[in-house]
């Protein structure tokens, strides 16, 4: 699949620009890359810090799949980024925290924000997968310095954002083909291999309050996290509106 990369020095947010391009008929695998984002977005309108040195990109996908499978794109991206970074940087300490964060050690290296649009007929029109990777930053703002880190800080290796992007896109395309042809099993299997969430005690929160606490036991067929508390109560969470700690 041919990739079309559009590069910008600065944008409001690569997801916003990619959604705009997708609405204007941009083809699948159009990729928006910016050196800086003025309003990088996390989930729940959180801010994504996007200064020089990081890889800030958004990929437009148009999978011909039923919309209920769309959330799997986030897991696909997390698996692809993790595998790409593990091979490029030759380290297995890169792991996935459910649903959309890639960590090295305990700190956050990458965030993924997928956004879905449907056609009037209820089919998938596009999915924009935003990927932010801390590649070469040497410091973070005060409120992030305990939770965020970069590949340069952690490994001392100086790959460029373009090298990291190329590797991510290569692996992403392999998983994408697999997803379209054979479904989600391989992605799920690799997600299970790379994740650091299952088997741990987690606190599930919405924007303001704790909703549930328990052991993360399973990833279901749709990518929902299954959490069981001490009393045996089991709940499933999808990743729209919650965070876990
Ligand atoms: P969460 O992981 O907290 O559930 P998101 O996936 O939406 O939520 O990520 C947004 C959060 O990530 C922000 O609230 C902030 O704590 C953190 N963050 C913002 N920018 C960066 C960055 N460049 N690197 C690592 N973490 C960041």
Image (tube, rainbow, N blue to C red):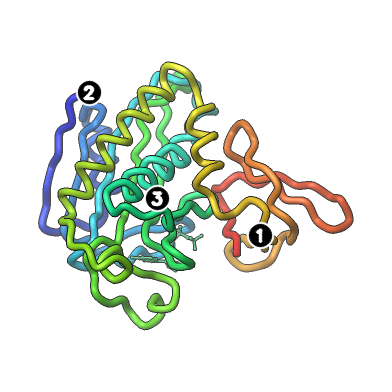
Dividing the image into 4 quarters, which one contains the N terminus? top left
Question: Image check: 236 left or right of 163?
Answer: right
> Quarter-wise, where is residue 157 in the image?
bottom left
Mark 3, Cα crowd under 10 Å, few <14 / some 14-19 / many 20+, is many
Q: Residue at x 42, y 28 (%)?
A: 118
Dividing the image into 4 quarters, which one contains the C terminus? bottom right
3D distance between C-alphas at marks 2 and 1? 38 Å
Earlier in the chain: of badge 3 and badge 1, it is: 3
Viewer-nearest of discs 2 and 1: 2
Q: Which mark is residue 112?
A: 3
Q: Nearer the viewer, residue 185 or 111?
A: 185
Q: Nearer the viewer, residue 63 or 178?
A: 178
Q: Could you tell me residue 215's position as x and y percent?
A: 73, 55
3D distance between C-alphas at marks 2 and 3? 22 Å
Q: Could you tell me residue 99's position as x and y percent?
A: 52, 49
Earlier in the chain: of badge 2 and badge 1, it is: 2
Earlier in the chain: of badge 2 and badge 3, it is: 2
Q: Residue at x 31, y 55 (%)?
A: 132
Q: How many marks?
A: 3
Q: Pointer 2: what residue?
A: 1
- Does any atom of ligand 1 lie closer than 8 Å to the CB of label 3? yes
Q: Tell me if label 2 and label 3 are in contact, CB under 8 Å.
A: no
Mark 1, Cα crowd under 10 Å, few <14 / some 14-19 / many 20+, is some
Q: Could you tell me residue 98's position as x and y percent?
A: 54, 51
Q: Is residue 56 above or below residue 79?
A: below
Q: Which mark is residue 204?
A: 1
Q: Is residue 60 above or below residue 147?
A: above
């Amino acid at each position: 699949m041919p990739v079309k990369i559009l590069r910008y020095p600065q944008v409001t947010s690569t997801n916003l620009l990619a959604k705009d391009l997708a609405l204007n008929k941009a083809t699948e695998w159009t990729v928006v890359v910016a050196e800086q984002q003025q309003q990088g977005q996390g989930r729940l309108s959180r801010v994504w810090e996007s200064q020089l040195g990081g890889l800030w990109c958004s990929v437009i996908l148009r999978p011909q799949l039923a919309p209920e499978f769309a959330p799997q794109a986030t897991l696909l991206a997390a698996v692809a980024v993790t595998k790409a970074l593990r091979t490029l940087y030759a380290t297995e300490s890169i792991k996935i925290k459910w649903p959309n964060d890639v960590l090295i050690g305990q700190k956050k290296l990458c965030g993924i924000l997928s956004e879905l649009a449907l056609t009037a007929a209820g089919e998938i029109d596009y999915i924009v997968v935003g990927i932010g990777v801390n590649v070469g930053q040497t410091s973070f703002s005060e409120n992030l310095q305990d939770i965020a880190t970069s590949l340069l800080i952690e490994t001392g290796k100086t790959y460029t954002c373009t090298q990291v992007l190329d590797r991510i896109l290569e692996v992403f395309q392999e998983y994408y083909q697999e997803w379209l042809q054979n479904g989600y099993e391989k992605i799920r299997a690799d997600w299970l291999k790379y994740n650091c969430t299952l088997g741990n005690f987690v606190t599930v929160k919405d924007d303001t309050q704790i909703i549930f606490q328990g052991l993360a036991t399973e990833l279901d067929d749709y990518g929902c996290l299954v959490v069981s508390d001490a009393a045996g109560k089991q709940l499933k969470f999808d990743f729209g509106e919650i965070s876990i700690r």
